[in-house]
């Protein structure tokens, strides 16, 4: 039988949900207009005032916000509450090394944790469960979000964070963990490792997994389910809108319910910005209607997906989004970390290389790999292996500082990377997603 964390919200009628959205949107637009000069200026440029927004039907009149705006307004330019009311930041990497910083009041954290609690209950979680959170903690939103959600459900929470696989497996087995939260690639790696250690699915106590922060295929889902003997659920979120729990999968596993009491979702044509009718594929745009400290209106996620209001067998009434089917920008998600080619380019240029490079992404044993092939310039060309190795090490270290993850670097002779007539093919993504 399907269980809910907040049944009166999760199963509310369409009219009730729309009522909440209308009222909260009007209030939020006024809050942003009064407290965020950066966004007020954007509204003025578009000729819109809070009086023009009477409800969701007027949402399209508001200007968009993009990652570029977050970069320009960094760090405090989009803050809508005084700092003394804010209790935390979370952060993700931005396009050129400037980080995206999101602010939270205590109320924002409570609502975010509610969203994560809904996801855990949708995956079958109760206060009798042992929930192991193997997402990264710290600035990354994965760990803190699901940690808080797990507390709210009343699970015994194991905050292992990511890495140290041996310890992860020890806790799963010794503490009889029943729910695992981590990236899909790490879940697959844990499954493979446990299999090598001789554990069979029926010996593994886990029953469910909540996996997000990177793209994964249905094949990968079935593999993980088989190896760990669990049901694997998808979860979606962005640091900019709070973190994981913006939407989550239910037992039907046919898309993720968006928490519409907190977020209004639109699908737009990425080229024209026009709002598309339901069922059309396009770019997902979110408006936060309950956030106090960092409320983003019409934030362009760059994720391509489809929304569906088809009745769901789980009884939840909130709109569903498909798994993201790609990006309308050049961002890559590697090991759950956002990586932009422009960040890599910045490091290369700082180290005196030209912008002739190629990024090769692959997935080996369920783990993402990143290799950057870089052309030496005639000035820094060398055929001394020791010198090349030393330079490669310098770039590896520079990329690690910029991206926060390890990359393999291969220096190649000048003019050996193929030139293209049109747009340079910078990225070769060999992952089967």
Image (spheres, rainbow, N blue to C red):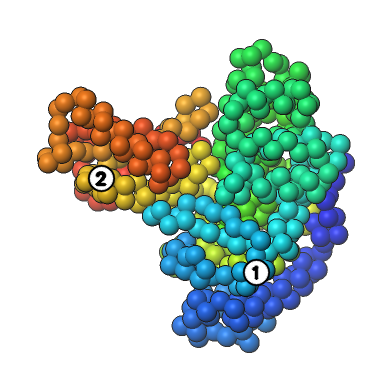
Q: Residue at x 61, y 14 (%)?
A: 196
Q: Is residue 262 left or right of residue 34?
A: right
Q: Residue at x 70, y 58 (%)?
A: 109
Q: Which residue does the numbered mark 1 point to in the structure image?
A: 84
Quadrant where the N terminus sits is: top right
Residue 352 in percent (x, y) is at 21, 46
Residue placed furthest toward the top: 198
Q: Nearer the viewer, residue 53 or 75?
A: 75
Q: Residue at x 40, y 46 (%)?
A: 402
Q: Nearer the viewer, residue 186 or 432?
A: 186
The mark that comes first in sequence, 1 or 2, is: 1
Above or below, 208 relative to 154: above
Above or below, 353 relative to 105: above
Q: Which residue does the numbered mark 2 point to in the structure image?
A: 351
Residue 245 in percent (x, y) is at 68, 51
Above or below, 221 relative to 342: above
Q: Residue at x 72, y 20 (%)?
A: 201
Crowding around mark 1 (Cα neighbors within 10 Å: few <14, some 14 to 19, many 20+) is few
Instruction: Check disc 2 and report its element: helix, strand or loop.
Output: loop
Residue 307 in percent (x, y) is at 63, 56
Q: Is residue 69 visible?
A: no
Q: Is residue 129 left or right of residue 263?
A: right
Q: Is residue 382 visible?
A: yes
């Amino acid at each position: 039988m399907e269980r809910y964390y907040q049944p009166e919200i999760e199963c509310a009628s369409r009219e009730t949900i729309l009522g909440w959205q209308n009222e909260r949107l009007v209030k939020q637009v006024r809050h942003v207009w009064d407290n965020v000069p950066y966004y007020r200026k954007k509204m003025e440029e578009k000729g819109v005032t809070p009086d023009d927004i009477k409800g969701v039907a007027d949402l399209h009149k508001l200007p968009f916000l993009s990652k570029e705006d977050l970069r320009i307004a960094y760090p405090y330019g989009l803050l809508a509450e005084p700092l003394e009311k804010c209790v935390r930041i979370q952060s993700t990497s931005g396009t050129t090394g400037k980080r995206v910083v999101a602010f939270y009041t205590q109320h924002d954290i409570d609502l975010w944790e509610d969203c994560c609690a809904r996801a855990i209950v949708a995956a079958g979680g109760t206060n009798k469960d042992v929930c192991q959170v193997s997402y990264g903690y710290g600035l990354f939103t994965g760990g803190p979000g699901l940690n808080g959600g797990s507390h709210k459900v009343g699970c015994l929470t194991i905050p292992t964070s990511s890495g140290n696989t041996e310890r992860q497996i020890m806790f799963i087995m010794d503490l009889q963990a029943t729910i695992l939260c981590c990236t899909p690639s790490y879940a697959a790696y844990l499954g493979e490792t446990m299999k090598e250690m001789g554990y069979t699915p029926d010996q593994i106590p886990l029953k469910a997994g909540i996996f997000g922060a990177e793209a994964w295929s249905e094949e990968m889902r079935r593999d993980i389910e088989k190896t760990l003997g669990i049901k694997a659920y998808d979860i979606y979120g962005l640091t900019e809108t709070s973190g994981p729990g913006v939407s989550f999968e239910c037992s039907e596993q046919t898309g993720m319910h968006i928490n519409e009491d907190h977020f209004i979702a639109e699908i737009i044509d990425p080229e024209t910005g026009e709002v598309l009718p339901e069922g059309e594929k396009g770019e997902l745009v979110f408006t936060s209607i309950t956030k106090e400290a960092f409320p983003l209106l019409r934030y362009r996620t760059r994720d391509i997906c489809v929304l569906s209001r088809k009745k769901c067998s789980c009884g939840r009434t909130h709109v569903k989004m498909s798994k993201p089917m790609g990006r309308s920008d050049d961002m890559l998600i590697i090991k759950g970390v956002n990586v932009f080619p422009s960040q890599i380019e910045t490091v290369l240029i700082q180290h005196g290389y030209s912008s002739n490079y190629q990024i090769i992404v692959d997935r080996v044993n369920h783990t993402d790999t990143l290799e950057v092939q870089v052309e030496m310039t005639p000035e820094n060309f060398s055929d001394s292996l020791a010198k090349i190795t030393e330079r490669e090490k310098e770039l590896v270290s520079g990329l690690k500082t910029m991206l926060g993850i390890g990359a393999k670097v291969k220096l190649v002779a000048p003019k050996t990377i193929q030139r293209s007539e049109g747009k340079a093919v910078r990225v070769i993504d060999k992952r089967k997603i």
